[in-house]
Amino acid sequence: MDPSDIGKAYDQITHLWQRPGFDRSNGIAQHQRALAFASKAGFALDIGCGCTGRFISLLGQHGFSAEGLDVSSQMLRLAKARNPEVPFYHADICTFAFEKRYAFISAWDSIWHLPLASQEPVLRKIVAGLEKGGVFIFSFGGTDAPGEMQNRHMGPEVYYSTLGTNGFVSLMLALGCQIKHLEFDQYPEPHAYLVVQKESD
């Protein structure tokens, strides 16, 4: 499934994040843990920012100049209405060109929608887009091996892929990142996240 198809799928389900019962605390504690490793504030990028603005707000509270990126035009329309002062990019992270380096990058429940073959090149690009000492948090499918799947859990068909836990850890180490935190935060579900820091030297 092409990332543009993911954007169209998410265009249809923005209501899931706007409903009164949506848990706005989802991912906040994990981001606070990641932010504890940030040595200084600066520019921050939320990849797959969605429409809630909860990570944008958290980053702002910690002194970061936050920006958002999403492949869904409807998610971004709502995000801009909520935070009109924040720069947002309607883009596919696979082709997005970084014009600056960031002190903090988040990709929460987003890059797992990339084609499996795009996982490594996109992660290489993201790490290259970090400042030295910058922090990156991302969630992924914490499986034992690489894989991909599609389901209709949210309504429209959506694609997921993963390099597997060891695949992501090995890649981050190869890219000169220190592993700061790895957690299966919804166990026994295979939802996991990594916090890594780009080496300073």
Image: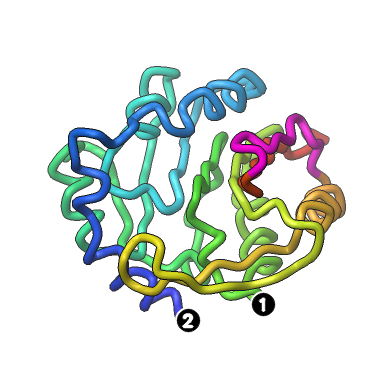
* Left or right of residue 117: residue 165: right
Say what secondary structure mark 1 lies in. helix
At x 41% / y 53%, what residue is drawn? Answer: 48
Reply yes or no: does residue 30 show up in magenta. no
* Left or right of residue 57: residue 21: left
> Which residue corresponds to mark 1?
117
User: Height in image: 36 above or below 132?
Assistant: above
Identify the residue at the far left of this view. 81
Which color mode does the image show?
rainbow
Q: Position of residue 164 (x, y in %)?
A: 75, 59
Depth order, front residue of 188/57:
188
Depth order, front residue of 132/94:
94
Identify the residue at the far bottom of this view. 1
Q: Main secondary structure of the magenta part?
A: strand
> Which residue corresponds to mark 2?
1
Earlier-in-chain disc, 1 versus 2: 2
Q: CA distance from mark 1 to mark 2?
A: 12 Å
Query: Residue 12 has which mark?
Result: none
Identify the residue at the far front of this view. 188
Q: Position of residue 27 (x, y in %)?
A: 48, 33
Q: Position of residue 92 (x, y in %)?
A: 42, 68
Q: Position of residue 72 (x, y in %)?
A: 30, 63
Q: Which residues are magenta?
A: 177-188
Classed neighbour count for the residue bearing mark 1: other residues with Cα under 10 Å, few (<14), some (14–19), many (≥20): few
At x 58% / y 73%, what residue is drawn? Answer: 149
Q: Which of the 4 quarters of the picture holds residue 20? A: top left
* Left or right of residue 65: residue 44: right
Q: What's the amino acid at mark 2?
A: Met
Quadrant in the picture for the C terminus: top right
Say what secondary structure mark 2 lies in. loop
Q: What's the amino acid at mark 1?
A: Ala
At x 77% / y 52%, what residue is drawn? Answer: 165
